[in-house]
Image (cartoon, rainbow, N blue to C red):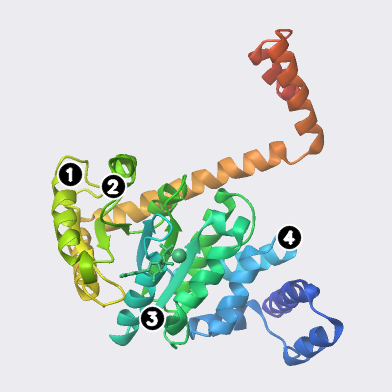
Amino acid sequence: MEGQENQQKSTMQVMGGLKSIHDGMGQTTRKQFRRSFKKEISVDDFSREILHGSRFHLAKAITLIESTVAEDKRTGQRLLQELLPHTGNSIRIGITGVPGAGKSTFIEAFGKYLCDIGYKVAVLAIDPSSTLSGGSILGDKTRMEELVRLDNAFIRPSPTAGTLGGVHKKTRETMLLCEAAGYDVILIETVGVGQSETIVRGMVDFFMLLVLTGAGDELQGMKKGIMELADLLVVHKADGNNVKMSKKTAVEYEQILHFLQPATPGWTTKAMPVSSTENLGILEVWKIICTFKEKLNSSGVFKERRQSQTKDWFHTMITDRLMDNFYGYPETKTQVKSLEQEILQGSITVSQAVENLFPAENKT
Ligand SMILES: Nc1nc2c(ncn2[C@@H]2O[C@H](COP(=O)(O)OP(=O)(O)O)[C@@H](O)[C@H]2O)c(=O)[nH]1
Ligand SMILES: [Mg+2]
């Protein structure tokens, strides 16, 4: 009886969730959609469809996860909870590099190769800049033209909501949903600016940096921090007149890498030339990743890293929630602004200003 009630409740939640996703639709389309969904769908049915690899249901589930509507978010979380035992069985790969380094083109070539040899590949993107320009999503769609048509591939552009922190959380959860849907390889593209590569490093097993030949000293210097995050450096566009130079650059990078802290304990970061347009080095990249996984599985580092990533994620979410709770009120924002002024005028100490913001704590 109770089971039945739960079933009904979850059915309503999914239907509610779907309704709000489609609230933006015109009346007729919405009606049509409802009609096609007349057959009741419960969270259980929904998760079963995802486990069977339905891309339609996977995409809908991600929309629930990304939604800012409380009811949808709750439904999304229930789904995720149910699917959790089926997650974790993929290799998670992050790909970074400056805009124009050829990340999307590499993903197209690499993804196609992986699909060819029988894997299911999901591509996710973290590109906070794309939400501002809107440009790179369109660019990626044309660049991944062939991959997008393959049955074994699933491509999801950046969530269009808010802060990098928010994008981070949604991408992680999306990754888990993709794993439940049976994707063996998850590729996360991130643009090499600001903090996004650190965030992606914190959610993947293997991290790749795409570099080009002929970048000035200034640029090389800037990359040191990012180089220390990478498990593999790809000297990209190693084709045509660029072949010789790319090989030379790869050797130079290996020399620099020698002096840097390795990103992963027990693994030596390599540098190698690759051409995605000519399909050169693609298979070698996959071989390196397989060796990496084997080596780290047997040393235990693979599992340890995933556990510490999950722990870090938990703590980041606690911090996010506290920040939301605190800054979520317009009055707080006003109060903070005026205290800021008082601090700058020297009429209140920083400590006192903080005390003023937490009056309830003063009473205890
Ligand atoms: N010659 C050559 N050009 C490439 C290669 N990969 C990408 N490109 C070109 O580099 C440009 C930027 O590629 P894109 O994948 O959008 O870069 P992203 O911004 O890093 O995602 C495009 O014009 C691609 O055609 C490659 O392997 N060889
Ligand atoms: Mg791109």
Q: Quadrant of residue 320?
A: top right
**Residues at marks 2 and 3, CA–CA distance in whole angstroms:** 29 Å
The image position of residue 57, as x and y in percent, is 59, 81
Residue 221 against residue 62 in the figure, above or below: above
Marks 2 & 4, CB-CB < 8 Å contact: no
Q: Is residue 143 above or below residue 328?
A: below
Q: Which residue is mark 4?
A: 70
Q: Identify residue for label 1.
A: 256
Residue found at the far front of this picture: 241
> Which badge, 2 or 4, comes first in the chain's sequence?
4
Alpha-carbon neighbours of circle 1 within 10 Å: few (<14), some, or many (≥20)?
Answer: few
Sequence-first tag of 3 and 4: 4
Which numbered mark, 1 or 3, is in the foreground of this view?
Answer: 1
Q: Closer to us: mark 2 or mark 3?
A: 2
Q: Residue 70 versus residue 59: which sits nearer the camera?
A: 59
Tags 1 and 2 touching, CB below 8 Å: yes
Q: CA distance from mark 1 to mark 3?
A: 35 Å
Which of the pair 46/285 is nearer the observer?
Answer: 285
Secondary structure at badge 3 equals loop
Image quadrant where one finds the C terminus: top right
Using a 10 Å C-alpha cutoff, classify the residue at mark 4 as few (fewer than 14 neighbours), some (14 to 19) or many (20 or more).
Answer: few
Q: Amino acid at mark 2?
A: Met
Residue beneath disc 2: 227
Q: Is residue 303 visible?
A: yes
Alpha-carbon span between mark 3 and mark 4: 32 Å
The residue at which mark 3 appears reads as 120
Check disc 4 and report its element: helix, strand or loop: helix
Mark 1 or 3, nearer chain start: 3
